[in-house]
């Protein structure tokens, strides 16, 4: 089959990989002009995620670029430790930068055709396929179309309806960009720097003021780069999702007057090549398939951040491709089976995103103190770890016979 996938991030390339393994041809259309390299560290945890990465054969490449597991240390304006999430909780079993992950997944499926700088503008289902029109003006026919284009999925809008019906804003925004690691957070890159509370720490340092959080995290590979990451409380904002300069201006406004390292991190924002900003939201779509169209990853069941979106993206891609193979390519059988298999699992992991904003950036000083107090208790850390571990493993991953035949 010829399958068109919209979105070249995590779910899209993972699906292309599995479709290739099952003997289908995947084409990925990505609105960005090239593979997006941005994003902070993302993690995989537990045997389900790790087993799947192993089956895809990408573990050695990922291990080479892993960031080493980043502890999250919350500090005051002088860099004094207030509370810490250990690396095992914050970074799972394998932590890599999102851009590295996307690149390695793309490299794993070399037969995939890529259409960068384009997007689907119309889809018409016919008896034996989908006739697709692209923004570039070209038209092509595919057997199936899959939306792997994130929480603001264009395919979901075209096939299911406007975003407002399916996306719930959860009261926060997050953004991330690269900065020069002038603090030596990544290890011994700057051995001459005198030890301070900052450069003694490998990992992520986080500072809060009510309703705002700003952080910087090192890279254990001594690349000389660090990742800035912010979260702030806000009702839903109107901005152009494709206008990065306007989004950077928005961040400057939101972080004006903030203390700690905020002025230096914000200064680096203007020069940052890849920059990511999004609302924290939850995608609630009762169905992920319609006719010859399906959704995977965040487009189906995203939670922006804190909802194990990367692991769920891999799982949904594998199960969708596996069910298609098991049904001999008959989407009328495969699509309902795909939804049945992972619906409960994905909606469970998604729940993690509901509390991410409140945890990262409590809206009051009392809220910040209460969060720090609670998370200094071992039983709270243990419980949080257990909930994350339970959610990440709450599925028996099917072993599709058609896949065994391709090994
Ligand atoms: C640049 C970037 C940085 C990120 N940084 C982080 C991070 O630091 N921490 C974290 O936890 N999560 C981050 N995420 C989200 C994380 O990647 C996802 O939650 C998760 O991996 C699920 O991936 P996905 O492939 O389903 O969706 P996404 O990763 O959101 O990818 C969707 C892809 O579709 C493309 N796209 C969007 N609309 C269209 C369209 N109409 N036509 C064609 N293509 C389209 C996007 O450019 C993107 O490449 C980031 C996502 C992006 C795109």
Image (tube, helix red, strand yellow):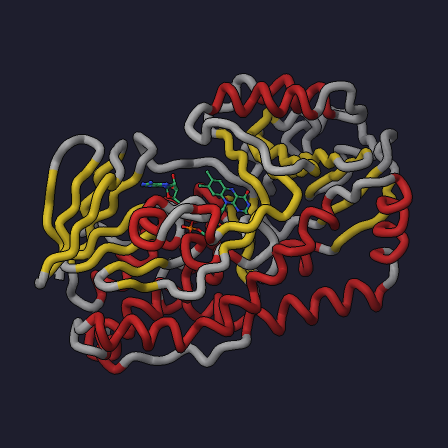
Which residue is at the front of the view, 278 or 121? Answer: 121
Query: Residue 218, can we see it?
Result: no
Taking the image as shown, residue 283 lies to the left or right of residue 401, namely right
The x and y percentages for residue 354 are 64, 56
Q: 265 above or below 278?
A: above
Image check: 52 left or right of 199? left
Ligand 1 in which quarter: top left
Where does the image place residue 263, in percent across and percent down from the top left? 72, 19
- Identify which residue is drawn at 42% across, 28% down: 242
Q: Quadrant of residue 75?
A: top right
Viewport quadrant of the C terminus: bottom left
Residue 337 drawn above or below residue 16: below
Q: Quadrant of residue 121?
A: top left
Pick the residue in front: 406 or 150.
150
What percent of the width, then of the height, locates residue 180? 59, 25
Q: Residue at x 87, y 57 (%)?
A: 374
Q: Is residue 343 above or below residue 373?
A: below
Q: Is residue 254 left or right of residue 8?
A: right
User: How many labels sit on residues?
Assistant: 0
Residue 135 visible in the snapshot:
yes
The N terminus - image quarter: bottom left
Q: Residue at x 17, y 73 (%)?
A: 330
Question: 108 or 353, which lies in front?
Answer: 353
User: Which residue is at a point 39% across and 36% down the rendered structure image?
Assistant: 36
Residue 243: x, y in percent? Answer: 44, 24
Classify 49 as above or below 275.
Answer: below
């Amino acid at each position: 089959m010829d399958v068109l996938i919209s979105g070249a991030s995590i779910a899209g390339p993972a699906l292309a990989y599995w479709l290739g393994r099952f003997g289908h041809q995947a084409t990925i259309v990505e609105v960005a002009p090239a593979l997006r390299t941005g994003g902070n560290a993302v993690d995989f945890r537990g045997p389900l995620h790790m087993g799947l990465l192993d089956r895809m054969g990408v573990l050695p490449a990922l291990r080479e670029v892993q960031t080493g597991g980043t502890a999250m240390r919350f500090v005051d304006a002088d860099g004094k430790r207030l509370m810490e999430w250990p690396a095992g909780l914050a970074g799972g079993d394998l932590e890599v930068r999102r851009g590295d992950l996307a690149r390695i997944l793309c490299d794993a499926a070399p037969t995939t055709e890529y259409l960068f700088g384009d997007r689907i503008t119309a889809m018409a289902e016919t008896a034996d396929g989908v006739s697709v029109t692209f923004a570039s003006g070209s038209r092509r026919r595919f057997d199936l179309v899959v939306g792997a284009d994130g929480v603001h999925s264009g395919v979901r809008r075209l096939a299911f309806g406007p975003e407002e019906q399916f996306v719930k804003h959860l009261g926060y925004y997050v953004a991330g960009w690269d900065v020069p690691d002038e603090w030596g957070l990544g290890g011994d890159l700057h051995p001459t720097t005198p030890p301070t509370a900052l450069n003694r720490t490998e990992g992520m340092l986080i500072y809060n003021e009510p309703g705002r959080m700003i952080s910087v995290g090192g890279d254990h590979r001594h690349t000389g780069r660090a990742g800035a990451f912010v979260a702030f409380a806000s009702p839903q904002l109107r901005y152009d999702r494709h206008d990065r300069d306007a989004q950077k201006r928005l961040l400057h406004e939101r972080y004006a007057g903030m203390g700690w390292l905020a002025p230096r991190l914000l200064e680096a924002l203007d020069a940052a090549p890849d920059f990511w900003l999004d609302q924290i939201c939850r995608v609630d779509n009762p169905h992920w398939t319609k006719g010859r169209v399906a959704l995977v990853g965040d487009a189906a069941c995203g939670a922006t951040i804190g909802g194990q979106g990367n692991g769920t993206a891999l799982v949904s891609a594998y199960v969708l491709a596996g069910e298609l193979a098991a049904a001999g390519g008959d989407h009328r059988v495969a699509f309902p089976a795909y939804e049945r298999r992972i619906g409960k699992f994905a909606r469970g992991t998604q729940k993690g995103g509901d509390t991410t904003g409140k945890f990262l950036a409590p809206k009051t000083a009392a809220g910040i103190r209460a969060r720090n107090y609670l998370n200094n208790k071992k039983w709270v850390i243990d419980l949080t770890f257990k909930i994350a571990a339970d959610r990440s493993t709450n599925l028996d991953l099917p072993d599709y016979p058609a896949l065994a035949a391709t090994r």
